[in-house]
Image: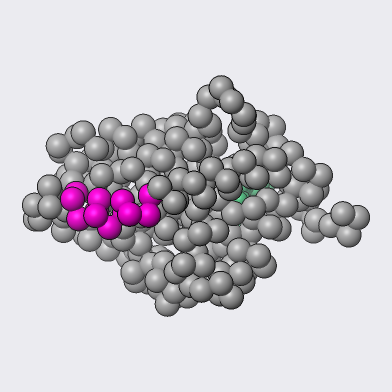
Amino acid sequence: MSIRTATFNKVLTVEIARPEKKNALTQAMYSAMADALVAANTDAGVRAVLITGQPGVFTSGNDIEDFMQRPPASGEGAPMPPVIRFMQALMDCEKPVVAAVTGAAVGIGTTMLLHCDLVYVSDEARLAMPFVSLGLVPEYASSLLLPALLGHAKAAEKLMLGEPFSGSDAVDCGLANAVLPAAEVVNHARRMAERFNNLPPQAVRETKRLMREPQKARIREVMAAESALFGARLRSPEAMEAFQAFFQKRKPDFSLF
Ligand code: COA
């Protein structure tokens, strides 16, 4: 199992721990994270959730081999893919969610931050949403939320060109709260999560709901549209070329498309 969970001092830590693959997320890992987030809602011993990675890497995003071999099933009657269960569980988490971005945060490693409440980033982190470079389209409502946060032009750099950016860029654009030295980011995020222990939990929960609820219906609509396209793109020749190039450690060749 590459997701470790533990509750200490009323903070549930969800630690992504697959360093040999740069914390790439498999279906089993999404399921484990979804289960932990859902359980946190009804666990009175949990006041906040902390999502973190390994030194130098938060997550390199979806496991690209899973994308190739086991693309999420789609269509009427198909079971909900674990990645969608995870996305919904994070969006619907009633407790405050704090992220400690310990290093590289690629794809969903960055888009999930749009659905966390407090985000602390290592000064060594690189964030990127290279969906287009992989022949894919944005997910997790990033096509809606990122332009809303940054404006279209800045969002286009990140979503259409897939330009990587630093932790301080993330703070400047409102995606993160602060940049910390790599050795301090997890402890700082934990201390911030523990601050909820001294606050009235119902008031915290209602405040989060008031802040999130007005946008939820629109976010779900956009996610459904993105997911339909994303599923189709996963099976596209452009994506196949990008995935093969990644594993062959070469640049993809899109000149033929
Ligand atoms: N899926 C599957 N395997 C992955 C992976 C991913 N998302 N990211 C990294 N890995 C694997 C590599 O294939 C490599 O495996 P190997 O040792 O068997 O060859 C191992 O993890 C180490 O990765 P490597 O690329 O050598 O590490 P790096 O430090 O040079 O670069 C990243 C780190 C995160 C910048 C780079 O791995 C990367 O860009 N990964 C892909 C990110 C991506 O496109 N994710 C999908 C977004 S939708």
Residue 220 x %, y %: 45, 45
Number of marks in the image?
A: 0
Residue depicted at 48% across the width and 72% down the height: 150
Instruction: Please say if 15 is above or below 185.
Output: above
Above/below status of 17 relative to 138: above
- Residue 209, placed above or below residue 158: above
Q: Is residue 211 magenta?
A: yes
Q: Residue at x 56, y 22 (%)?
A: 77
Specify the segment rendered in magenta. 205-216
Quarter holding the C terminus is: bottom right
In this view, the residue in front, 57 or 245, is: 245
Dividing the picture into quadrants, the one containing residue 73 is top right
The residue closer to the viewer here, 91 or 249, is 91
Percent coordinates x, y for residue 2 in the rendering: 46, 37
Q: State the quadrant of the N terminus.
A: top left
**Where on the picture, by quarter, is residue 100?**
bottom left
SS majority, magenta:
helix
